[in-house]
């Protein structure tokens, strides 16, 4: 009889430095708290079938994590508040804090005079 069970995980490959959401299956299935957390992919193992992860902010290593228990965290989701910030608002209080910080940084960068490299002569 053929196996009709399917994985709910989409077929996804990850790259070093990518941010992912990881669910520790042992902690999840035993009802422990803190089973799902954000990680950074540190190493791709065994031809991309498992990954070494660094959980944020704890930094304790997760070795040989299965991609079935990982989901990508797209940059667009992290940057949505900045990308959708109302630029025509009357006050900065109406904008999300991340958007204000980004706009402040951009204004500071644009207002600085470019520096010339030191003269070697």
Image (cartoon, rainbow, N blue to C red):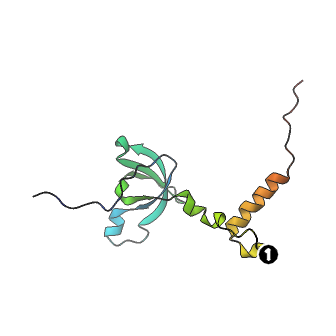
Q: Secondary structure at mark 1?
A: loop
> Residue 4: x and y, percent?
19, 61
Q: Is residue 118 above or below residue 107?
A: above
- Pick the front one: 13 or 44: 13
> Residue 37: x and y, percent?
47, 64
Q: Residue furthest top?
A: 121
Residue at (87, 26) in percent of width and height: 120
Residue at (56, 57) in percent of width and height: 75
Q: Quadrant of residue 3?
A: bottom left
Quadrant holding the C terminus: top right
Q: Quadrant of residue 84?
A: bottom right
- Pick the front one: 16 or 75: 75
> Residue 21: x and y, percent?
46, 61
Assess disc 1: are there few (<14), some (14-19) or many (≥20) residues with their C-alpha within 10 Å of its C-alpha: few
Residue at (71, 70) in percent of width and height: 86
Q: How many marks?
A: 1
Quadrant holding the N terminus: bottom left
Q: Residue furthest front?
A: 88
From the image, tell me which residue sits under label 1: 90
> Residue 12: x and y, percent?
39, 52
Q: Is residue 69 left or right of residue 106?
A: left
Residue at (52, 48) in percent of width and height: 17
């Amino acid at each position: 009889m053929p196996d009709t069970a399917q994985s709910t995980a989409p077929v996804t490959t990850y790259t070093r430095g990518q941010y992912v959401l990881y669910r520790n299956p042992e902690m999840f299935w035993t009802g422990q708290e803190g089973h799902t957390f954000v990680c950074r992919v540190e190493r791709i193992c065994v031809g991309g079938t498992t990954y070494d992860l660094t959980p944020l902010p704890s930094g304790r290593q997760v070795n040989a994590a299965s991609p079935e228990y990982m989901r990508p965290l797209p940059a667009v989701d992290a940057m949505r508040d900045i990308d959708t910030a109302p630029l025509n608002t009357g006050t900065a209080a109406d904008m999300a804090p991340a958007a204000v910080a980004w706009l402040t940084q951009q204004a500071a960068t644009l207002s600085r005079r470019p520096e010339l490299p030191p003269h070697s002569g």
